[in-house]
Each structure stands twice: as C-alpha cells, then as structure tokens.
Image: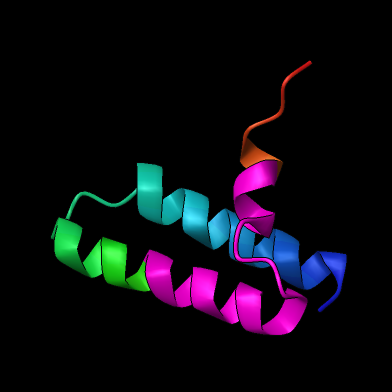
Amino acid sequence: MGRGGLAELGRLRHYLIFGRKDNRAHREKLMKAIDDYVEEMTGDWTRLHAQNHKCD
C-alpha cells in the first residue's frame, strides 16, 4: 500500500473520529475495519495512528 492510499485511509479515519455525528457503534466498526485493512496491507495496524500523534 502506497503513501497515497494510507493518506486516504487516514483522512477517512479522521472523518469518522471527528466529522460524523451519527451512531458511535457504526463509527467504531468502520474504524476497526480500516485498522484491520491497514494491518493486512502493511503489517502494522497502528500505522495511521502514528500519523495523527506526533511528538515534536
């Protein structure tokens, strides 16, 4: 999976966390599915998490 694909999934995950106002259970299922897919493609399910939490 290239950086472009991870970036798109990262934007979708961010939208699910911060942008949606509907049922939380559906949001969590979608986020889990994204994490599972990223893990399958990269071997590291936390790959998108690290992009959003940088310590400088």
In the picture, measured across the screen, residue 16 lies left or right of residue 9, that is: left
- Locate residue 50, reporting x and y percent: 67, 44
Identify whether 13 is placed above or below 34: above
Identify whether 20 is placed above or below 1: above
Q: Residue at x 72, y 75 (%)?
A: 43
The residue lying furthest to the front in this view is: 43
Q: Quadrant of the N terminus?
A: bottom right
**Main SS class of the magenta portion in the image:** helix
Q: Quadrant of residue 4?
A: bottom right
Q: Residue at x 36, y 71 (%)?
A: 30
Magenta highlight on residue 30? no
Q: Residue at x 72, y 59 (%)?
A: 7
- Locate residue 40, reporting x and y percent: 64, 84
- Locate residue 42, reporting x and y percent: 75, 75
Q: Nearer the viewer, residue 26 or 19?
A: 26
Q: Residue at x 57, y 80 (%)?
A: 37
In the picture, measured across the screen, residue 9 lies left or right of residue 4, that is: left
**Color scheme of the displayed model:** rainbow
Q: Nearer the viewer, residue 18 or 33?
A: 33
Identify whether 34 is placed above or below 51: below
Q: Which residues are magenta?
A: 31-50
